[in-house]
Image (cartoon, grey):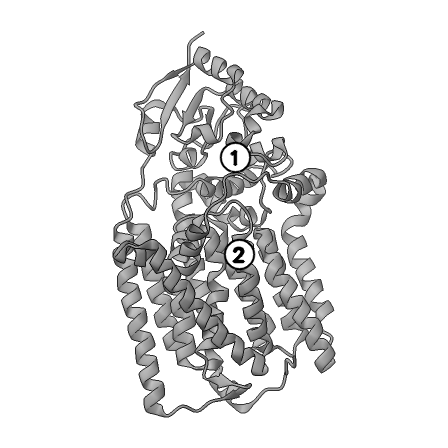
Amino acid sequence: MPLPLARTSYESDSSGGHRGLILLIVAIGLGLRVYQLSLPGHLFGITEYDDGVYFGAALRLIGGFVPYKDYVLVQPPGIAVILSPIALLAKAIGTANGLAVARVFTVAVAGANVALVGLLVRSRGKIAITVACGVMAVYPDGIAASQTVLLEPYLNFFCLLALWFCFRSFRFRNSRYAIFFGGIFFGIAGSVKAWAIIPVVVVVILAFVESRVSGIGTPLTLIAGIGAGFAAFTLPFIVLAPREFFHQVVAVQLSRVPGQRVGIETRLSDITGAGPFVWLFGHPGLVVAALSFTLVLLFVVALMRVIRRGAALSVFTLLTTVIVFFALMWPSDFYYHYAAFEAPFLALTLAVAFSNFADGRRVEFPDARESAAFRAAAALMSLLVVLQVAYESAVPAAPLPKKMASLVIPKGACVVSDQVSLLIASNRFYSTRVDCPRWLDPFGTALALSGGRTVDGGAAQTAAVVSYWLSALHRAQYLWLTPQNARRVPWTAATRSYFNGHFTSVSSSSSEVGTIYQRSAQ
């Protein structure tokens, strides 16, 4: 399939246009995310488990503790490096305020993703811009994934930034420097989450195809950039703990023992963005089926345009959309924020479907027809924004653990918890005791020590996991257990006996933030 590099006059003329439209939709996307963050408790409270792991890794890193070597981290280290300046700031303003800053920063990154999608499709007209940016702005799980420190907004940002460097007007840029920098950002994306391998493989294959057609040798330049970007964020950690890095980031993920499988309807509901519609209309099965059919139909429209003569970015978009979809459907595990990784590729695919192009050339619609189509797209987006605001307004308040912790846990105490975000949001993350456990992720630690099993999936019977928890309990002054602790703590006869004999409740039990226990006087 030809992927021409030649530029036509309309591409250079249109490439600088529509900035106002892009900025308007970026503002809408930011507004939806800021509104979500303004809901009671969502800026300073507990909304996730994973954010404690990722921001906690940055806090540990600036304190001199290295992931993989000093504690388990089953994701690449990119997020810890990226957030380390905010973690350094948190040393002065407190970890609770630092986490709030990181959440605001994540919202800003998500807004940048809306802008990058618009920049990638702006040569294809304002309808394509409205559709692509609109999808990124209102995609429900994309908004939910930016509520706190999760990997997907950062993964999407570096992938989209890489695409912006690699492509112009949907074709590979005729610049080795641009391609190299595009590769660097793809490499950084891989240092954030291994899922970046999907767009990386697709773009490298297309670069080889392009090189055979045009004779321009960009593939090796691209690969060199990918390697440089990945190495810049991971090489120090690999050098310090090569075996542990490979085991925790690669081997554990590949050897994970399947647990209870998340159903296909749940996955499709998240991927299609059905949540607000189900909330409004009910009938989840019917809504999911209708949205799935609509998206498949639009994908076929985009595919037909690409088959006729697709530019490189169009081909990349469709291939990546399909591969990411099946990647999300394959494993047993699935969480709502996973779907956010599909958002940019889905947005670009819909832009291809609604593009003012066919067969690689501009289609000049009558002004009245194009204007009507744009108004229809804008009206639909406006309705989706109103629906999303109503949907977000129904989100419950997030619990604030800081008050409870301040009443019973002195600063500098050694606190062990099955959810470290509780400690971060309470300014009880740092301990003055040198023998206090420096771990972050009980869930991931169980995976690493048991060959890929979760505590409720068999790791509780693994001697290494039990020994790890017993060691932590021996050194803890306080133990903070959430209502989900049975999924993370191996409650064997040995751990339960030690817990019952050495800890006493010092807080009221909460269905939201759990119970705090203090070591009994000996």
The answer to which of marks 1 and 2 sits earlier in the sequence is: 2
Number of numbered tags placed on the structure image: 2
Q: Residue at x 26, y 57 (%)?
A: 280
Q: Secondary structure at mark 2?
A: helix
Q: Residue at x 50, y 48 (%)?
A: 83
Q: Secondary structure at mark 1?
A: helix
- Closer to us: 136 or 291: 291
Establish if 158 lies above or below 51: below
The answer to whether residue 94 is seen in the rendering is no
The answer to whether residue 394 is seen in the rendering is yes
Q: Which residue is mark 1?
A: 443
In this view, the mark in front (1 or 2): 1
- Closer to us: 183 or 412: 183
C-beta proximity under 8 Å, tags 1 and 2: no
Q: Quadrant location of the C terminus? A: top left
Q: Amino acid at mark 1?
A: Phe
Establish if 203 lies above or below 456: below
- Closer to us: 63 or 139: 139
Q: x, y percentage for residue 411?
A: 41, 27
Q: Which residue is mark 2?
A: 155
